[in-house]
Image (cartoon, rainbow, N blue to C red):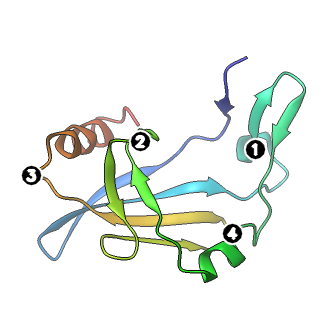
Amino acid sequence: MDDVRNYESKFEVREKDGKTIIVGQAVPFYDGTESTQYRLSDNMVERFAKGAFTDFLRSNPKIDIREMHEKNKVLARTPKTANVWEDNKGLQYEATLNPDVSYVRDTIANIKDGLY
């Protein structure tokens, strides 16, 4: 079985101070519903609890925001062009994009078209 996310990721493209940014939720915290867990196989799910990323984020790691997890398609990176944080709903992010990069323009268009 393929790795399947049951929740629907929500991304937004915004303009802020003349720059293009994307804002979204990377991981939802499990709230008891199927829509906030990852189905890894027919009999296995993965769930993230509130606070799952707290210690990791305190270490000020460099985190890449990538297009569809593609290793060579980095859209932004903390701390310079991305911010990643936990709130009571999950792991959130905001990334400032460089529209001079062709795959970044493609990603922006795909998000606006609802493909991601």
Question: Between marks 1 and 4, how big is the CA–CA gap?
Answer: 16 Å
Question: Between marks 1 and 2, how big is the CA–CA gap?
Answer: 24 Å
Q: Circle 3: is it few (<14), some (14-19), or many (20+) Cα within 10 Å?
A: few
The answer to whether 66 appears left or right of 8 in the picture is: left
Which quadrant holds the N terminus? Answer: top right
Residue ID for mark 2: 71
Residue type beneath disc 4: Phe
Closest to the camera, between mark 1 and mark 2, is 2
Front in this rendered view, residue 29 or 54: 54
Q: Circle 2: is it few (<14), some (14-19), or many (20+) Cα within 10 Å?
A: few
Asked if the residue under mark 3 is in contact with the one under mark 2, i.e. CB atoms within 8 Å, the reply is no
Asked if the residue under mark 3 is in contact with the one under mark 1, i.e. CB atoms within 8 Å, the reply is no
The quarter holding residue 72 reads top left
Disc 1 or 3, which lies upstream in sequence?
A: 1
Residue ID for mark 4: 53
The answer to whether 107 appears left or right of 57 in the picture is: left
Residue 43 x/y as whole percent: 90, 26
Residue type beneath disc 2: Lys
Number of numbered markers: 4
Which quadrant holds the C terminus? Answer: top left
Residue ID for mark 3: 100
Residue type beneath disc 3: Asp
